[in-house]
Image (cartoon, helix red, strand yellow):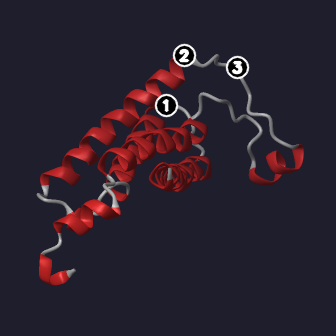
Amino acid sequence: MGRALLGLIKGLVVGSGVGYGLILFGHDQGVLSYLACGLVGLLVGLVCGRAPWRAETIWTPAIKMIFGFLVGLGLYALGHHFIPAGTAVPLAQDVARTFNLKNLTLTSGAVLAPLIGMLYGLFVEVDDGGSVRDEKKRLPAAAK
């Protein structure tokens, strides 16, 4: 349960940061959104699960990052094509005016990036996170 929550939080932080960047640059649709959601998958693959310096080989984090990039691209494509296009994000008028979010829809990269980050973060953290008991089993007898 703890690993799953940690993966959701890490994915939300990464995805929200990239989504906020999309809003700042004003590119919440199009090719840049595909690349940004791929970047979310890449970064989530890096920060979730076992730390890169604790991995058995260098290929494990590299594969998580490459697969994450492809997952981000694919999930954005699915969300962008299957969510109804005109569905607006319900926001308070004060928030929409303050952050210039008047035309934000559910199919935009700024909305889908945190969702993609959370989904992939949950998957990677549960799959590659390990547990405290596994770490103790790997330690040599003298280190215990």
- Disc nearest the viewer among 2 and 3: 2
In the displayed structure, would residue 119 be above or below residue 97? above
Q: Secondary structure at mark 3?
A: loop
Q: 80 or 98, which lies in front?
A: 80
Q: Residues within 10 Å of mark 3 (few under 14, many from 20)?
A: few
Residue 3: x, y in percent?
Answer: 45, 53
The residue beneath circle 3 is 86
Question: Marks 1 and 3, Cα distance to the nearest angstrom?
Answer: 16 Å
Question: Marks 2 and 3, Cα distance to the nearest angstrom?
Answer: 12 Å
The C terminus lies in quadrant: bottom left
Question: Marks 2 and 1, Cα distance to the nearest angstrom?
Answer: 15 Å
The residue beneath circle 1 is 30
At x 46%, y 51%, the residue is 7
At x 11%, y 57%, the residue is 57
- Disc nearest the viewer among 1 and 3: 3
At x 74%, y 43%, the residue is 101
Q: As shown in the figure, which amino acid type bears the numbered disc 2? A: Phe
Q: As shown in the figure, which amino acid type bears the numbered disc 3? A: Gly
In the displayed structure, would residue 21 be above or below residue 79? below
Q: Secondary structure at mark 2?
A: helix
Q: Is residue 69 left or right of residue 6?
A: left
Q: How many numbered markers are drawn?
A: 3
Q: As shown in the figure, which amino acid type bears the numbered disc 1? A: Gly
The residue beneath circle 2 is 82
